[in-house]
Amino acid sequence: MIDIVSLVYLMVCTPLICAVLLFVLKFMFKNMPDYINFAASTFLSLCSLSSSVLLFEYVITYQGYTLESNYPVCIVQNIPLYFGIYADNLTSLFTLLTGGFFLIANIFSYKYLRQNRQGFARFYIYLNLLQFFSFCFFLSSNLIQSIVFMMATSLVCYLFANFYFQKPQAQSNSKKLFVVDTSGDFILITASVAFLFFSTLVPDTTNIPTLGFNNINSLGLYSFAGLNPFMFIFICMLFILGALIKSSQFPFMSKITLCSEAPNPAFSIILSPIVIAQGVFLLYRLYPLLNLAQGAFEIIKIVGILTALIACTIALKENSLKQICSWMAISQTGIAMCALGFKMYETSVFYLVCSGLATVLISYTIDSVSYSTGSQENIRFLGGLREKLPFTALMYIIGALSLSGLIFSGFYPKTEFINNLAFEKSSIYASIFLLVLFMSTFYLFRVYFRVFEGEYKGSYEVQKTSKLMKFAILLLCIPVVFFGLVFNKYSGYFLSFSTAQKITPDFFVNIFTFIASVFGYYLAYNIYFTKRICSLRYRPVRRLAAKHFYCDYFIDFIFEKMPLFISKIFSFFEKYTIGILYTLIKLKIKIISFIKEKLETNSVNSEFFTLAVWIFLIALLFVVLYFKTGVIN
């Protein structure tokens, strides 16, 4: 009988074996039938899912027990590096999600690829590689291994973004995506190496496995006690910055939108918690470490709620279905990030999983619409599809109701989050969350009324959704409906690590979330379906609602006029860059010497250090805006 450790290694290697097998068959048989790629990939993906179910059952059965296995890979400067697996409740949950999402992607993709007739075998090779790297990331036993496989996942996302490499837009977007992802990887590697170096300076850490997640709390305590506190905080800030880049959080939100040229089924996987939330998952793993850094969680919750608010605002004016899905996923990830910033560990995981399930369901229904309408993705040229695609319309409604928090799985994490905010007496964050909830419901049903109601405006004859696509969407619909109830009832079995006490739900607090969602639906119904606003009798208020609360003007100002103004300022100063370059180099040397001297004497002034960090962050923001304005081509 095979033991559980061998089963986990077999589960991890199965997608890699499938990718190698498909690669060999592709070169041995030039005219190999497409269904062989589909059958092999789907069967092995089903095997991986079965193994992930057994792992999940094993971890849940032996509550509080973690499965760990490490093998030494190499030794660098007397520091051993390991490859291994580390499975606890959190890992087994995300591993189960990974197996389920990729099985659905395999089933859904067959008919879609048959319609496009391009890169059939290549798609399934990439898909299995992405599954392999995702398994390795979630099951990593140490920090270095996690970041290495996160980099590998970024590489496969780049390959998917450039899948249709004949398109100039795909080539351009994939290059930008690669640059942004590489920047995040470089920051995370820098932080990991720094943490590894400084943690080994403490004598008590010599017997602790190198950056292992099972000992991350001990390493954090030893490093915090043995390091200069400002250096420790700086390393934690680097981890947070890298995680924000990888999860497309403010101000790096446009990263995921660069993947929009990827094939639709792969794009749905990228929007799932398996890829977009890898940065958030890394912060889950580093939670004990970040808990020692003063101000770390304040930054996380501010960035998270800003990301959610800005992403929802942008989604209000979008007409492209893919772009709307991108901003929708970014917004939901931002709320999960904000929950983590409030140290609501369990709520953050709950929200991330439930919103991720609903996001992927909506994304696949939109993929089905694109398949049936000849790749039409502009909602202005759609409509009337409820009668032609009733199953797809029903699945979209289920996903929208869940994501808006009205019923199904999305209801529970949203009410839990707002109750925790009420308990923390964070009225500002609660108000912003309700606003985000209102806007999310509004644009979700805006899409529904523009796509599925009214009259069809497209010129392409709508074809029926294939049975395989319907089966894949139906498989995903089941957890969207029931997972929230199961998790809410048995959360202690799903997560053994929870830092906040269980808050008793307040009926009056819950009613606010319900009203915010209902009002968003009501406004979308009146504007985009009945073309009237019954409750708004005054003309100025009616115009205000019809213009999406002036979000068009706000977005134009933020993304067009303000960057243009800033670019002119930078263009003016650019003329004098060469003249002051030598002075800047000398100043840099002086600053480095000063900081080195203060670190050696352990007398760094906290106010000076805080001021220097803020200056660096503001300068970094201006540089990002400078490059985004297109002044440098």
Image (cartoon, rainbow, N blue to C red):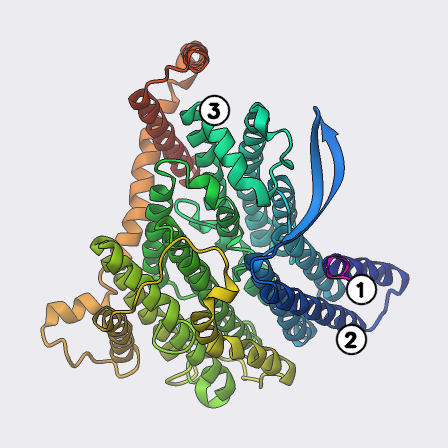
Q: Nearer the viewer, residue 324 or 91?
A: 91
Location of residue 46 with respect to 568 vertically, above or below: below
Q: Which residue is mark 2?
A: 35
Q: Amino acid at mark 3?
A: Leu
Type of the residue with mark 2? Tyr
Observer able to see residue 127 = yes
Is 212 placed above or below 406 here? above
Q: Which residue is mark 1?
A: 2
The 10 Å Cα crowd at callout 1, few under 14, some 14 to 19, many 20 or more, is few
| Residue 243 lies in the magenta stretch | no
Q: Nearer the viewer, mark 2 or mark 3?
A: 3
- x and y, in percent, of residue 137 in the image: 63, 51
Q: Quadrant of the N terminus?
A: bottom right
Could you tell me the amino acid type at mark 1? Answer: Ile
- In space, the residues marked 1 and 2 are separated at their CA atoms by 31 Å
Q: Residue 57: horizontal and vertical position, in percent?
A: 63, 68
In percent of width and height, residue 252 lies at: 44, 45
Other-residue count near label 3 (Cα within 10 Å), few / some / many at <14 / 14–19 / ≥20: some
Q: Secondary structure at mark 1?
A: loop
Q: Are marks 2 and 3 in contact (CB under 8 Å)?
A: no
Q: Residue furthest right?
A: 28
